Image (cartoon, rainbow, N blue to C red):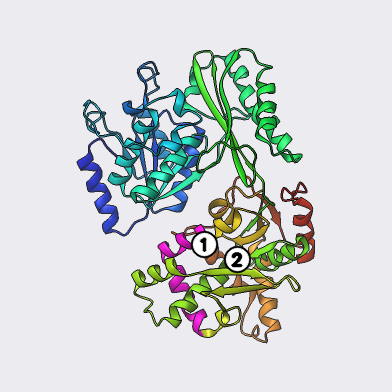
Amino acid sequence: MRLVKTIAGLRSCVDGYRRQSCEIGFVPTMGALHAGHISLLERARAENDRLAVSIYVNPLQFGPDEDLDRYPQRLEADCQICAELEADLVFAPTAAEMGATSGETTRVQPPTPLLQVLCAPFRPGHFPGVATVVTQLLNLMQPTRAYFGEKDAQQLAIVRQLGHDLKLPGEICACPIVREPSGLAYSSRNRYLSDPEREQALALWRGLQRAQQLFQTGEREAIALIAAAKDELARSPAVAVQYVELVDPHQLTPLASVETAGLLGIAAYVGNTRLIDNVILRARRPIIAIDGPAGAGKSTVTRAVAQQLGLLYLDTGAMYRALTWLVWQAGLSLDDEAAIIELAHQADIQLLTDDQTLKLRAIANGTDVTTVIRSPEVTARVSAVAKIPAVRRYLVRQQRRWGEKGGIVAEGRDIGTHVFPDAELKIFLTASVRERARRRWHDFQALGRGDDLDLAQLEAEIATRDRLDSHRRIAPLRKAPDAIEIDTDGLSAAAVVAQIVNLYPRHDLAE
């Protein structure tokens, strides 16, 4: 791991990564790393060739009466954590190096509508300071992906908007809140709390849970949901509530009721420590994300689960095949990545389910391509198209848009970890190498092609595939921390489907 403290040193490292065509995962922090930060670093490490971390206490985002002078700083310990997580680069500049000591420093001003709610009215100047340093860091780091925690929900919304408006480099990746066993959201400021105050601080999480439970009974009105949270907070008089608000998670506009999703946020003082927490209330049918190694039966199981529950089977493979068909029809060279990326961003690819048969149809630019995308011409080209990182990022965004209303089942290697990290039900299907080899051998036998194969050969091939899938640059195979693992050894496909159907959340929020 390399520690650099100057912009010149950082640029030299980044230039080296770019010359090697490395994907850079970037985690900006203010140090005092805890389990929440570690979750960001672990995800960035898994999804990229290089992991870069910034440790910088940004003075521009602190008000005159805030805790800049006592904010915890422990660079040596933080670097040790980064090294243990196999970070490649830590950027730890001074305020002078970042140009934050001059009163003439240019500030980036977020859109005014994003500064009307939640923390912004209570912390004037904070988010322009955040926006300024994030813009600086993204421009300097040139990441492929940058990772931000959902606990700082207003910051996340502002950074997303900045990235879109200013065309900043890097996909903004949101990561779930990580909580202590008690439910308290991890924060660097938690170390300010005494033992009694830590107990009092749990009122924030209990308030959010109270509102969430009411939401799950069908309540959608903001007045009732906010009142439920406030009622729980009032049971802890030592907690000085600053706000409880319900807003749109992306636009941050106040909501009178939740139609698709609402961000319920709380800020409060416990002693002299200001804490924030939030929860997303989603009014959608649940999403089922099914991941697992090759040969575990994901496709068969996913189709059957979708049919039994009346959900859309989101065939991500069909999406890549539909785009590949368009590439083939346009006569584009598979080496012309720029042209393929341009075509992808102009394409209209849809997956539709026939109401009578529940069979999936793929539509590309208005043409039904359900059958032709399985042709040898498409099959021979799809891997070359799917391996282009920009193509994958674009199609993942489309998949997420389809997921906004829920009611889908999807399978792959990283559906639950990357595409739908907020899925209500995550399944990791697995089976022993021997069992998967046996299944493949039977498949070949059914096709009249198994005479030349033996189980030992198939086991070796599957073990190699597992290693490759787990270390892919794009979409590595990983089990989500909150996924339910189902070992399919000795189980029929019908038995696996029955398990998943029984796990499906019965509070169907669309009804």
Left or right, 318 with respect to 53, comes to right
Which secondary structure dominates the residues rendered in magenta? helix
Q: Does the segment drawn in magenta span residue 435?
A: no
Residue bearing mark 2: 294
Badge 1 vs badge 2, beta-carbon distance below 8 Å? yes
Front in this rendered view, residue 304 or 433: 304
Image: magenta residue range: 377-398
Q: Does the segment drawn in magenta span residue 383?
A: yes
Q: Quadrant of the N terminus?
A: top left
| Structural distance between the alpha carbons of marks 1 and 2 | 9 Å
Percent of width and height locating residue 234: 67, 17
Residue 136 badge: none
Q: Is residue 418 above or below residue 250?
A: below
Residue bearing mark 1: 469
Left or right, 230 with respect to 157, comes to right
Q: Quadrant of residue 402?
A: bottom right
